[in-house]
Image (tube, rainbow, N blue to C red):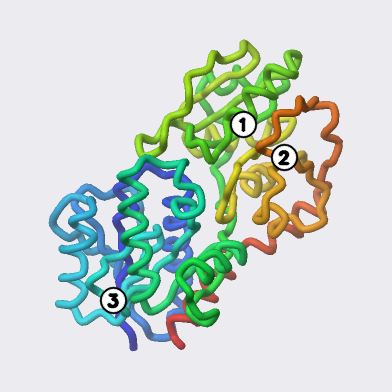
């Protein structure tokens, strides 16, 4: 029997892509106790964790302190060693360095290495220092695509067998009926939808250009600015572009399900979950960047590819590709947390 602790610092953070993945993995692991094979799991969280996050089978241990770097790098590993844990599972890129080969860490991407311009220098320096050391010392690295695996191998000179690719699943969203009046009003008229922060990586400049070049179409962008990202230059928003700020899952699902098309113009992604979330909620027209991870996900399916860095004017009428329901259902079966959790639990047993 192995004793596996789970780093629950993600439950102190706002739910964006990485935190959503962590929550879904832990919920699915909790639901599949039949696959534990006698192993024991414990979720270790700081005092300021989201107590609304409920589990049935995995016990939650509240460890004194706030969920910051110091808690993760000092208090958490001390507790794992004291309790004689075999492994610590870390789903959000970072792990306590002092645990060395007791760490299993999910590194989603290496944007801070290949695109340092996306971040401020403090974030860059911290991630470069920590990721290099954890990649070399940890027991195993999990990542979210073959693209990210290759970059990890090339950057840190790692053997193939040290890295396992676990595709992210697509979470179930809440019912999309009862939402606030502002969101209902947005959906009253035809619109194209985009999800992303103001990180340069998310390439909101492309949406600005689309809005200016297509004045008769409406564009809606959700997401909020994160202070770790380098700021975008100030640009005046055209009248046919609306920023919603951070949205609840309910509001997000409502807009996903009612948009004329979902636009994903990222310059770089380790995986890229929002297009799959849009499909899960009923959207069938995708306009996505011509980058490796989008091709890895969609292969030869009918999606519309864009050159995200191009300044050439694009007309929305040129996007004619659309998935049918059968294609969408088959695609979603390929990205299942149940399948990835089975793969992860097998890995732990080995």
State which mark lies toward you, 1 or 2.
2
Q: Badge 3 is on which residue?
A: 100
Q: CA distance from mark 3 to mark 1?
A: 43 Å
Label 3 secondary element: helix
When the figure is inspected, residue 329 is found, relative to residue 207, above or below; the finding is below
Name the quadrant containing residue 188.
top right
Q: Judge by depth and name the residue closer to the eye, 172 or 7.
A: 7
User: Gap in Å between the C-alphas at discs 3 and 2?
Assistant: 41 Å
Q: Which residue is mark 2?
A: 307
Q: What number of labels is visible?
A: 3
Q: Is residue 289 above or below residue 60?
A: above
Name above or below for residue 74 compared with residue 244. Answer: below
The reply, left or right, for residue 39 in relation to residue 118 is left
Q: Quadrant of residue 39?
A: bottom left
* x then y, percent, for residue 276: 65, 49
Residue 250's x, y, as percent? 52, 36
Q: Is residue 282 left or right of residue 110?
A: right
Residue holding disc 1? 255
């Amino acid at each position: 029997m192995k004793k596996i602790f789970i780093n629950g610092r993600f439950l102190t953070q706002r739910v964006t892509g990485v935190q959503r993945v962590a929550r879904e993995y832990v919920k699915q692991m909790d639901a599949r106790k039949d696959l534990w094979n006698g192993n024991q799991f414990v979720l270790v969280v700081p005092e300021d964790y989201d107590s609304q996050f409920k589990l049935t089978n995995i016990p939650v241990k509240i460890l004194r302190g706030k969920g910051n770097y110091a808690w993760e790098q000092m208090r958490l590993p001390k507790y794992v060693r004291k309790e004689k844990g075999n492994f610590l599972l870390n789903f959000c890129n970072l792990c306590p360095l002092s645990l060395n080969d007791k760490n299993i860490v999910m590194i989603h991407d290496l944007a801070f290495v290949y695109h340092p311009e996306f971040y401020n220098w403090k974030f860059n320096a911290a991630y470069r220092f920590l990721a290099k050391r954890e990649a070399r010392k940890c027991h195993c690295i999990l990542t979210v695509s073959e693209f990210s695996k290759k970059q990890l191998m090339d950057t840190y000179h790692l053997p193939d067998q040290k890295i396992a690719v676990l595709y992210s699943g697509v979470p179930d969203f809440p019912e999309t009926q009862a939402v606030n009046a502002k969101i209902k009003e947005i959906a009253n008229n035809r619109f194209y939808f985009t999800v992303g922060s103001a990180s340069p990586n998310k390439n909101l400049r492309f949406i600005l250009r689309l809005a200016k070049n297509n004045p008769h179409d409406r564009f809606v962008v959700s997401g909020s600015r994160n202070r770790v990202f380098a700021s975008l230059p100030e640009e005046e928003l055209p009248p046919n572009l609306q920023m919603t700020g951070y949205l609840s899952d309910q509001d997000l699902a409502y807009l996903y399900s009612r948009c004329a098309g979902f636009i994903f113009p990222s310059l770089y992604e380790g995986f890229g979950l929002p297009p799959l979330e849009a499909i899960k909620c009923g959207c069938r027209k995708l306009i996505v960047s011509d980058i490796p991870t989008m091709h890895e996900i969609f292969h030869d399916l009918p999606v519309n590819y864009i050159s995200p860095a191009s300044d050439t004017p694009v007309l929305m009428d040129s996007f004619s590709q659309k998935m049918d329901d059968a294609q969408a259902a088959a695609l979603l079966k390929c990205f299942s947390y149940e399948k990835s959790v089975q793969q992860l639990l097998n890995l732990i047993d080995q």
